[in-house]
Amino acid sequence: MNENDSPREGVSPSLSNYDTSSPVLHVVVVGFHHKKGCQVEYAHPPLIPGGQSFSNEIPSQWRNLPSLALPDGSHNFTQDTVFFHLPALHNPRQTVFGISCYRQIDADKVKIKTDDITRGTVQKSVCVLSRLPLYGQIQVKMSLITQAYFEEGDFSKTELIKETYENLNECLSDDMLHTQQLYVGLSAREFVSRYKQKCLQLFKLVLLERKLLFFKSPVSELSGDILTLLSLFPGLLEEGLAESSCIVPEDTPEHTPEHSIVDPALEADNESVKSISPSPSVNSFIPHSDSLQSLSSRVKDRLSGALGYISSGKTPSGENPGFPEPAEEVKEETVQELPNFTQTASIPIHELDLPLKIFTAGNLCHPYLSLPYLDVLMQPSIHGYIIGATNALFKAKSGISDVILEIDEDRLEVNNPELRRAISLTTEDLRFIDNVIRVVSEEGRDQFMEGVGWEGGDEWVRAQFRFYLICLLRTSLESRDKPVMHHFNSQFYSALDSTLWYRSWVRNPPEKLVNIPPGHPCSGQLSVSDVKLRLSHTMHNTEGGKRVSAAVASTGRAVADTGKVMAGGIGAAKGALSAWWGGLRQDKSKSPSPPDASPAGSPSSENQVPSETNQEPSDKPERREEASNSRNKDQESVKHSN
């Protein structure tokens, strides 16, 4: 280090020290000092205009750069990758995208040691600050460069850092944003396989401008999952993150573009826009009360909204709203009005006013935030965000999050009951996401071609969510009392009406979108499989279902343990009974012999004497009879003699 080794955070340069047209703005080395903590050790070009590359000076807008490049808890890992956002120095309403490759090695492997190496390990990150959101593309290159930089063993040699800056600016371009290179390392297939039904809930949460916290350590998978979720929105990674790190000041005038979108006058505009439709509305397809009995087939096709559908079909006058055709033709017309995947896929996203301007006016997106941002998030000008964190204080601090996604524990915590109901998946939603999961998880796919083919690949998954989003937006233009609203969850639309981006978007919806028929891409008749889907989703993705599953599992274990105990007890009792019976039979086998067979003078003979005595009373009647007979004979003989 040179003489400019003292950190001077808070420096406010009047101009940035980078070329705004270059893909890469800076390549920075951040290290951990045992006394000063995380600090910038080298930057090319220098972060401060007119400064030195080895200076620790940091622009005030980037004062948290060191803590972002060296994440919380990084000492527990030998390597990690961090994606983060910073406001641009030349325009605070633009975003600079950071990609940091972290490494930790033993101090013994460092060939040229400096005075600041006082511990057994060395922790550093090589960080790229780019104006292009080519996260994965840059990360692949920086991973190899960081490995070579550490293997050199001499951190004072910075030629590799300078060459990296020049080479990246030569090989990166704006055209790469419109190719698949934008999605390197962001696998939509793996995202769906990991989160299953939760991925659709997270998708809808992004639209509601709530405070969503992703929690996991290390950072690589954490920030990667957030960016993969955003990649499901068409055009959002390419152009939708320009203001994702912009904080609207509290003293912003009420009539600026940032605040004009919340003008109460929007309510009247919303009503007029919702009435726009190039084809007859849903109400126009319902005959009057005299022909309701002919609607049985249509009612079955839309069973989930049958009651509300019929009740809304009657006009105040009781007359036909304007569709006098027979019921059979009504059914054919209804089939033609369903959303069509091929039709929507052929429309360029700019004609659909995509990407959506979600991350504007105080709604932030940070794939990773360090601890110093806790106070920043509490500013009144920030009303929503999607952030990733590894520090438990983000979960513990009150008011930081509306929703917490525990990635390791696969748990989605929603404390607000109304928000929980708003993101609850409908039967049609479950059909949609179950089909995506089934195709993605289909067995028998070639592992060498995984994610490359169309059906079930990353592009296919993003196309499905694009179709879902277009149908959701088109249906939102319908009246809120129509049954079709229930297909996407009517409470979700109620929450959507209060978001800033939607209130601005609905004032002037794109014409191409208005021409698409409303409805859910998976609407249809209810079946037994829908009941199974609902039951499975309830048991695996709701707190009540998880408690029931846990109770059933614990009860099963208790029954199994009780069965083992009972089986052991029965076995022991059976053994005791067998032993007793065996002993009894053995005693019988040793019982005394009959009297005539017993030897003289034996105990058995003595025992037989009382038996003979006992038989004597039974012989006395015979002796008395013989005596009586002899007396009678004597008397008769005496008579004859006389």
Image: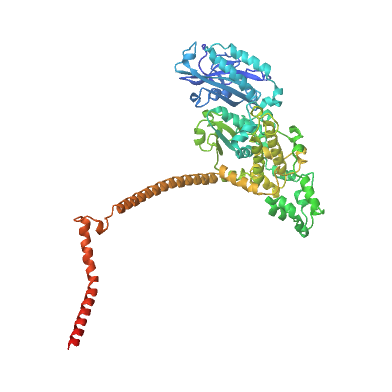
**Where in the figure is residue 31, as x and y percent of width and height?**
52, 19
Say whether residue 25 is left or right of residue 375: right
Q: Residue at x 58, y 45 (%)?
A: 538
Say whether residue 635 is left or right of residue 65: left
Residue at the right extreme of this rendering: 325
Residue at the bottom extreme of this rendering: 642
Q: How is the image coloured?
A: rainbow
Q: Which quadrant: the C terminus?
A: bottom left
Looking at the image, residue 621 lies above or below residue 641:
above
Please identify the quarter of the rendering in which residue 437 is found. Answer: top right
Q: Residue at x 46, y 45 (%)?
A: 560
**Where in the figure is residue 235, as x and y percent of width and height?**
69, 31
**Where in the figure is residue 213, as x and y percent of width and height?**
56, 35
**Where in the figure is residue 358, as x and y percent of width and height?**
66, 35
Along the line of sight, which residue is nearer the eye, 631 or 548? 631
Looking at the image, residue 218 lies above or below residue 543:
above
Q: Is residue 196 visible?
A: yes
How many badges with numbers are in the image? 0
Along the line of sight, which residue is nearer the eye, 130 or 220? 220
Residue at the front extreme of this rendering: 641
Along the line of sight, which residue is nearer the eye, 178 or 106? 106
Q: Is residue 129 visible?
A: no
